């Protein structure tokens, strides 16, 4: 059965503790059915890197956000400003079969996020703000909880502190079970981030050490922060924005930059997936030695 777009595939390992990353080569067959006979037109190999699943871990579906698209394409070209019910020459409702007519975005209750998105502002102790309509300059918040997916996200600051929006990091992960076969780079010349000391590896500007520092600080009352997967980053992209594809009413101090995911690129161990919030697109050809932004997450998985 096909999964909804954006879902990640999890494969059961039969309840055994797996310490190796399985690699599957799947022959994908394109078939043509003629007179009850199946004829293979062509095939190709698809390489899947599947993370290990430990016994006793609950496996289930994680809810998905909608796309955030609230406008429709017009007939015969162009776009409408809203999800208008335009009519084609044959009388069909053009918008009825489009994205804006389906999902949570249709019934936007407003106030807690763009379209069907729903967020809760959290203080640095992890508690929800009493006044969710408060302006950041009056009552700042440190994290945002996605009420649809259940994920909690780091909110960046503009104070040259630990969570500063301008700090960037190389990709580094010493866990061989999920780093795609290469640890990446602990530091690069020219690195600069809050607290950096070239003589102290714990202060290096890389993803792993940044996670460790945030967890040590108990940010938003938690110590299980991590680098998000590509799919998790994509879940907060607003796809009806042509640029700056993040809800800045909640994710203040957002930057139009590439953000590291924890998802290695399967075909090249030097690459890791990134998501750009300048345009909402994902890219795979990002060298782990590059310096990009990081927005940590907790929950899920």
Image (tube, rainbow, N blue to C red):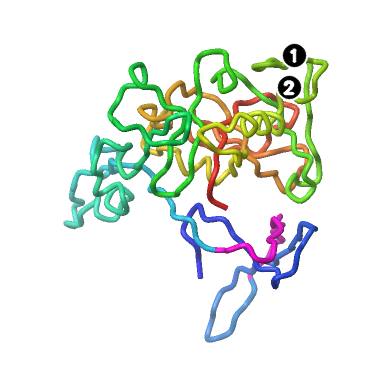
Residue 249 in the figure: left or right of residue 91: right
Note whether 179 is above or below 260 in the view shown: below
Q: Which residue is mark 2?
A: 203
Determine the residue positioned at 39% across, 31% down.
247
- Mark 2: give few (<14), some (14-19) or many (20+) Cα within 10 Å: some
Q: From the viewer's perspective, is 46 left or right of 110? A: right
**Residue pushed farthest bottom?**
36
Please say whether residue 50 is one of the residues in the magenta stretch: yes
Image side of residue 240 versus residue 156, left or right:
left
Please tell me whether mark 1 sits on a helix, a strand or a loop: loop
Residue at the spot 45% in from the left edge and 40% down from the top edge:
236
When asked about the image quadrant of residue 117, the answer is top left
Region rendered in magenta: 41-59
Mark with earlier residue (1, 2): 1
Residue 285, horizontal then vertical, whole percent: 68, 36
Q: Secondary structure at mark 2?
A: helix
Name the residue located 27 percent from the left edge and 51 percent from the top edge. 101
């Amino acid at each position: 059965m096909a999964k909804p777009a954006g879902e990640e595939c999890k494969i059961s390992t039969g309840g055994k503790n797996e310490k190796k990353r399985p690699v599957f080569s799947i022959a994908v067959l394109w078939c043509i059915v003629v007179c009850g006979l199946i004829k293979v037109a062509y095939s190709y190999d698809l390489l899947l890197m599947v993370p290990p699943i430990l016994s006793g871990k609950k496996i289930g579906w994680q809810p998905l956000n909608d796309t955030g698209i609230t406008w429709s394409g017009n007939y015969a070209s162009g776009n409408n400003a809203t999800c208008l019910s335009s009519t084609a020459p044959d009388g069909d409702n053009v918008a009825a079969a489009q994205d804006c007519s389906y999902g949570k975005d249709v019934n936007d209750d407003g106030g807690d996020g763009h379209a069907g998105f729903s967020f809760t502002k959290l203080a640095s102790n992890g508690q929800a703000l009493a006044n969710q309509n408060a302006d950041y300059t009056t009552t700042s918040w440190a994290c945002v909880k996605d009420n649809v997916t259940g994920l909690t996200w780091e909110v960046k600051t503009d104070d040259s502190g630990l969570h500063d929006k301008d700090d960037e990091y190389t990709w580094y992960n010493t866990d061989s079970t999920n780093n795609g076969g290469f640890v990446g780079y602990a530091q690069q010349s020219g690195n600069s981030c809050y607290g950096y000391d070239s003589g102290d590896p714990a202060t290096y500007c890389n993803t792993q050490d940044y996670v460790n520092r945030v967890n040590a600080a108990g940010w938003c009352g938690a110590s299980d922060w991590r680098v998000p997967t590509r799919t998790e980053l994509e879940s907060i992209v607003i796809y009806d924005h042509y640029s700056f594809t993040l809800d800045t009413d909640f994710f203040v101090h957002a930057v139009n930059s590439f953000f590291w995911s924890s998802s290695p690129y399967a075909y090249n161990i030097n690459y890791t997936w990134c998501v750009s919030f300048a345009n909402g697109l994902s890219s795979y050809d990002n060298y782990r030695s590059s310096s990009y932004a990081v927005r940590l997450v907790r929950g899920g998985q």
